[in-house]
Image: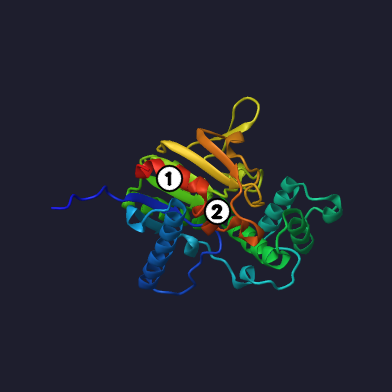
Amino acid sequence: MTEAGPDPLRIVAVHGVNNHFGSEISDTRIEELRRLKAAAWTRQLSQGLGHTVHQLDLDFAYYADKLAIGPAAHGADGRDYLDSPLAQQMLTDWAYELGVSDQVVQGHATVPLRALSSWVARKFDLAEGPLRVFLRLLFTEVSVYLEAEAAPARHAAREEVAARIARHQPRIVIAHSLGSVVAYEALHAHPELRPELFLTLGSPLALPRAVFHRLVPTPLSDGQTLRGTRPPGVTRWVNITDVGDPVAVPPQLSSFFEGIAMDHPTVISGLFRFHHAESYLRSATTAATLAPYLGL
C-alpha cells in the first residue's frame, strides 16, 4: 500500500489591478474564471519552485468586480489627466515620490499623464505606450478602493478577500500590488484569520499620502514617524519588491511598518514585465520564501 504524501500547501492569492473578469457575467462564469486564475498562479509558483503543482492548493480571491471601473480607465483615449480628482492627486503624489523633474511638473498642482509616463519610461527603461495605459488603470482602481474609509466598494472588496481566506484556511496569503492593500486591511479587520505567512509582492502600501496615510487602521506615531503594523493574526510577513518596479514605492516596507520579518529588494524582470504578478510568482526570491513551508 502506497503511503499518502503530505497535504498540499494551502494558499490564498489576492490579485492586483487589471484583473476584472468583465461586467454582467454570471456567478458560474466568475467561478470558472476564478479557477483558471488559480491554476495559472499555481503553475507560475510551481515553475519558480521547480516542483509539481500537486503540492499547492491555491484559491484565488477575486474582488475586482466590487470596484466599479468605467471603460475609459481601460483605454488610451489621449486625455492627459485622470477623470477622478483623487486618482489624479494620487498620480501626482506618486510622481513626487519617484522624484519627477520640475520640467514635468511645470509648476502645476497636477502632473500630466503623458509627460509623466514619458519621464518614468525613460528612467526605468520601460515601454511608454503600455505604461501610460497601465498608469491610468492603476490609479483609477486604487482611487476607487481608497476613496473613503467607509466606501461600499472598499468594504465589499475587503470582505470578499476575508471570506475567501476564512473559507480556505490557508497557511499562506500571497497578495500582489493593490491586492496587498486589500489583504492588509482584510487581515486587520478580521484578526481571527491566522495565516502563518503574509507575502506581499510589488506592494504600494508605503506610498505616502496616496496609500499609506489612507490605510485602515490608520498608521500610528511612534514619536517621530507614522508606522503601520503587521496584521494581528499573521505569524510572519515577508515583502518582495523588484528594484525596477516603480509602482512599489517606497520599495522597503519595513521603513514604514512594524513586524516585517524580511524585506527583499531584488531583480524580478525587465521591460514592461516589471510589475506583473507572473514575474514575481516565478522569481527565485518567492520560491525561497515558500520553500520552508513545503519542507524543501
Q: How far across and how far down the image is residue 194, in percent?
A: 37, 40
Q: In which quarter of the image is the C terminus?
A: top left
* Image depth: mark 2 or mark 1 in front: 1
What is the crowding at mark 2: few (fewer than 14 residues within 10 Å), some, or many (at least 20)?
many
Q: Would you say the residues marked 2 and 1 are in contact, meaning their CB atoms lie under 8 Å apart?
A: no
Q: Quadrant of residue 195?
A: top left
Residue at image point 60% right, 72% down:
71
| 285 lies above or below 277 | above
Residue at image point 40% right, 63% down:
39
Q: How far across and how far down the image is residue 168, in percent?
A: 33, 52
The Cα atoms of the two marked residues, 2 and 1, are separated by 21 Å
Q: What element carries label 1?
A: helix
Residue to which mark 2 is pinned: 178
Q: Could you tell whether 8 is left or right of 111 in the image?
A: left
Q: Which amino acid does label 1 sit on?
A: Leu
The residue lying toward the viewer, choosing from 23 and 174, is 174
Residue to which mark 1 is pinned: 290
Which comes before the other along the chain, label 2 or label 1? 2
Q: What residue type is labelled 2?
A: Leu
Q: Which residue reaches farthest left?
A: 1
What is the crowding at mark 1: few (fewer than 14 residues within 10 Å), some, or many (at least 20)?
some
The residue lying toward the viewer, choosing from 51 and 172, is 51
Residue 6 visible to an observer of this rendering:
yes
Q: What element carries label 2?
A: helix
Residue 185 visible to an observer of this rendering:
no
Residue at image point 52% right, 45% down:
285
Q: How far across and how far down the image is residue 84, in percent?
A: 67, 61
Q: How far across and how far down the image is residue 92, in percent?
A: 73, 53
